[in-house]
Amino acid sequence: VTLSLDQYRERFDRVMNLALTNNQVPDRLQDAMRYSALSNGKRVRALLVYAAGFAVNAPIERLDAVACALECIHSYSLIHDDLPAMDNDDLRRGQATNHIQFDEATAILAGDALLTLAFELINAPNSQLTDAQCRLISHKLAIGAGQIGMVGGQTLDILATAQLSSPEQLKDMHLRKTGALINAAVSCGALCAENLNADVLKRLSDFADNIGLAFQVIDDVLDVESNTEQLGKRSKADLALQKSTYPKVLGLEASKQLAQTLYQDAIASIDGIGDNTQHLTELATLVVTRKH
Ligand code: IPE
Ligand code: IPE
Ligand code: MG
Ligand code: MG
Ligand code: MG
């Protein structure tokens, strides 16, 4: 049977709830982790894991831990991104940000614990992954999340505040801060397959880079065009913080056009990898047409 994206989302919510249930964790820490990680996000990264896995016939039981790991890291990145020392936001997914709901120390620690939990889940004895897959997936995820990936990109974002970035600098920053984790989601989902063709992995990785960049371009556009109610986070926050964004550097229309081009390039990247790309296509569409 082929699951719909909604069915994958339901499955994910079930396994993620279990992944965040552990009676050895101090209540306050677990409450803070669950508050953010189980709140109302789009689950794009988890769904990309399942969609990429589906495209290469990976067994679904292997994808669960990987999908949870991706969303753990994503949630951690949002908690830390919202901290006063970074974007200083008070609203996320329609609720108070973690450090407002709890306190800064708890928010920092909840982020730390979610990041660590990602690697615990992948390497847990019951993860269904082979030892070789654990190693490859852990490595790919560490690269995407870490110093040359997401954390590196967040550093460039802070450095670019109140600066006029070139289009090249902006692309590099966005590919790191957002694209790298989206690439890890797609690549790690694919690595759950029994045998993975190197060319297929390369095409999936190109797909992910294209939608990863498009994802942050649209995030920047929505900050300008949408409203706080619809976004569940403060609109016009980038303007207030003097962030380097696509609308600021290229203009609004050119930014939207770029997202369309990236979408088309993404679809072209996975042309010919097989008949099971429908979920990837659906997610690529979601990335560029989303309203929040
Ligand atoms: C927001 O990501 C942060 C970015 C990388 C742009 P999402 O738009 O995926 O946030 P949620 O998970 O749906 O809340
Ligand atoms: C966040 O980019 C990227 C992350 C790695 C979290 P933004 O700072 O634009 O994300 P939002 O707009 O706060 O969700
Ligand atoms: Mg930020
Ligand atoms: Mg932010
Ligand atoms: Mg943003």
Image: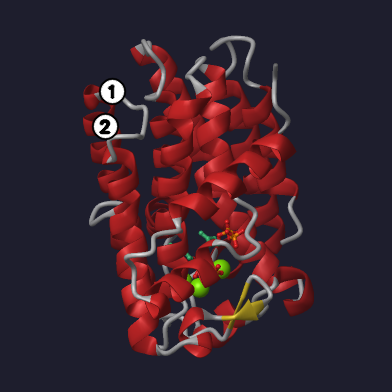
**C-alpha distance separating marks 2 and 1:** 6 Å
Kind of element beneath mark 1: loop
For the residue carrying disc 1, how many other residues have a C-alpha within 10 Å: few (<14), some (14-19), or many (20+)? few
Q: Which mark is residue 253?
A: none
Q: Which mark is residue 134?
A: 2
Which of the 4 quarters of the picture holds residue 122?
top left
Horizontally, is 117 left or right of 265 in the view? left
The reply to whether residue 108 is in sight is yes
Which of the pair 228/210 is nearer the observer? 228
Which of the pair 153/101 is nearer the observer? 101
Which of the pair 247/178 is nearer the observer? 178
- Mark 2 residue type: Cys
- Residue 144 is situated, as x and y percent measured from the top left of the image, at 32, 47
Pointer 1 residue: 130
> Is disc 2 in contact with disc 1, using a CB cutoff of under 8 Å?
yes
Which residue is rendered at x = 29% and y = 40% of the image? 124
- Mark 1 residue type: Thr
Which residue is rendered at x = 28% and y = 23% of the image? 130
The reply to whether residue 251 is in sight is no
Which residue is rendered at x = 37% and y = 10% of the image? 197
Which of the 4 quarters of the picture holds residue 9?
top right
Horizontally, is 244 left or right of 23 in the view? right
Kind of element beneath mark 2: helix
